[in-house]
Every structure is written in C-alpha cells, then in structure tokens.
Amino acid sequence: MDALIIAAGFGSRLAGLSPCKPLTPIAGVPLIELGVRQARAAGAARVVVVTGHEAERLEAFLPGLGARAGIPVVAERVADWSLPNGYSVMAGAARISGDYLLMMADHIFAAPILNNLAQTGGADGAKDWGVTLAIDRRVVSPLIDPDDATWVRTALNGRIITIGKTIAPYDAVDCGAFLATPELAGAIAAAITAGKAGSLSDGMQRLAEAGRAATMDVGEGWWMDVDDPRAHAIAEVQAPHYLPEFYR
C-alpha cells in the first residue's frame, strides 16, 4: 500500500514561521518528515507527495528524506495549487494503483491511529468501503480549532452522513487521515462535474450519500492539525512526547 500526502497549499497562517509549511519544523523535525516517517511506520511501501506552493524547495528536500526514512518518496506537482485540495488528491491518486493512506502534510498522529486505520478499513471492521476516515468524537478538545475544523455527522454504525466545515449538528471531527480507494478520486471528479468547487470534502460527501464512507474512531489517540502559530507552539511541546520514535 502507498501513502499520499497533500502538501500543495499556501499555509498562510504559518507563513510567519516558515515560507514552506511542509518544511516547518516541529521540535526540529519538519512536518513533511514526520508525515513520511508516520506513513512508513503504518506499513506504506511508498509515499507520493503532492507539491504546489514552494514546490521547488519541497521537491529538493524529498530525495534526502526518502533516503533517511528508508522509503521511496516521489513528488507529483499539482497544476494549480490555488484550487481546492480535491485537485491535489486527484493528482496524487493518479500515481497510485489500489488503496492508499491519505494524509495532510500539517497533521501529525500518534502511531496507533495510522496503524489501525491502515488495518481496519471501516467502523464495523469491514473493508468494503470507498473511503474510511479517522474521526475524533472529542469535539471540544483544546487541540481542535473550531473555526478551521471539518466536522462530521455519523450514523449509528459509524457511516458518514454529512461532512463539512459548516454543517450542524455534528458528532465528530475529521482528523485528516483516510484509508482511500480509487473511488475517492472518482467521487471528487464527479462532484466537480456536478458543479462543486472540488474540495476533498465534496468527494467525501458524494461517497457518504452513496453509503460508501466509513469512519474509524481514534478514541483517546493523540493527533494535531498544525495550522497556525498556537497549534505549532503546542505541537513543539507535545510531539516529542507522543511521537518519541521520531525524536530519538
């Protein structure tokens, strides 16, 4: 199984700390390096990184990272990084055959989350889903930015009913890690054809409406979206504790 890491966006809220968000260090280790190492630890055999903003700088970093991490890392540059993130998913998925772990470059996870996601494939243990999303039901956690979070409403069996930044009510938050099949890129493309902007959530909602979007609850697992200086400061303190294998 491959992993796909989306690293194309501008990252405006971290621009004051670093000109290239994926290369922003967390206690000395760049976000993209944490992501690649996490993917390898979860069983990925190769990592595809979708680049865009500051592409040259990031792409120059990747070969050395792959050598250090012991995993092939290849870049796929999206044609227009200013478009919604679904375009990055489609660009990266075109380089992958079969299922893949989908991750955001600014999200970091304690090891059990990605390990379980790679192995579970659905809230009920089934693997016959178009996509499985890691969710957190601790919706008032101080580690979550409510103004930037993507919210999820689920059915009793964990299937996604609705997903988006402005939905209400909701019972979980999107953690930014997915076990995806080729159906996801197809759903994003279909959503664009139907007039949607082309976000990852547009594709997810389309799969949800088809009954093809499952969830995996992270329980008490630690994760963070490092999207602004406040989150960065917290991650600098907590990441070495929760990700000790990457800080030895």
Image (spheres, rainbow, N blue to C red):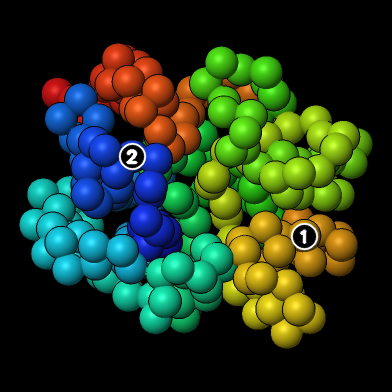
Using the image as rendered, state which of residue 225 and residue 4 is in the foreground: 225
Figure quadrant of the C terminus: top left
Using the image as rendered, state which of residue 171 and residue 142 is in the foreground: 142
* 86 with respect to 44 (left or right): right
Tell me the quarter of the picture where residue 189 sits: bottom right
* 234 with respect to 98 (left or right): left
- Would you place residue 243 above or below residue 34 in this image? above
Residue 135 visible in the shown view: no
Give the residue type that dot 2 points to. Answer: Leu
Q: Residue at x 85, y 38 (%)?
A: 168
Residue 7 visible in the shown view: yes
Mark 1 highlights which residue? 205
Marked residue nearer the N-terminal end (2 or 1): 2
> For the view shown, which residue lies furthest in the bottom direction?
193
Q: Residue at x 86, y 49 (%)?
A: 161
Tell me the quarter of the picture where residue 27 sits: top left
- Would you place residue 214 above or below residue 226 in this image? below
Mark 2 highlights which residue? 14
Q: Position of residue 82 (x, y in %)?
A: 45, 68
Q: Position of residue 195 (x, y in %)?
A: 76, 78
Question: What is the secondary structure assignment of the residue under circle 1?
Answer: helix
Q: What's the CA distance linking mark 2 and mark 1?
A: 28 Å
Q: Residue at x 89, y 41 (%)?
A: 155
* 47 with respect to 71 (left or right): right
Figure quadrant of the N terminus: bottom left
Q: Residue at x 63, y 70 (%)?
A: 198
Give the residue type that dot 1 points to. Answer: Gln
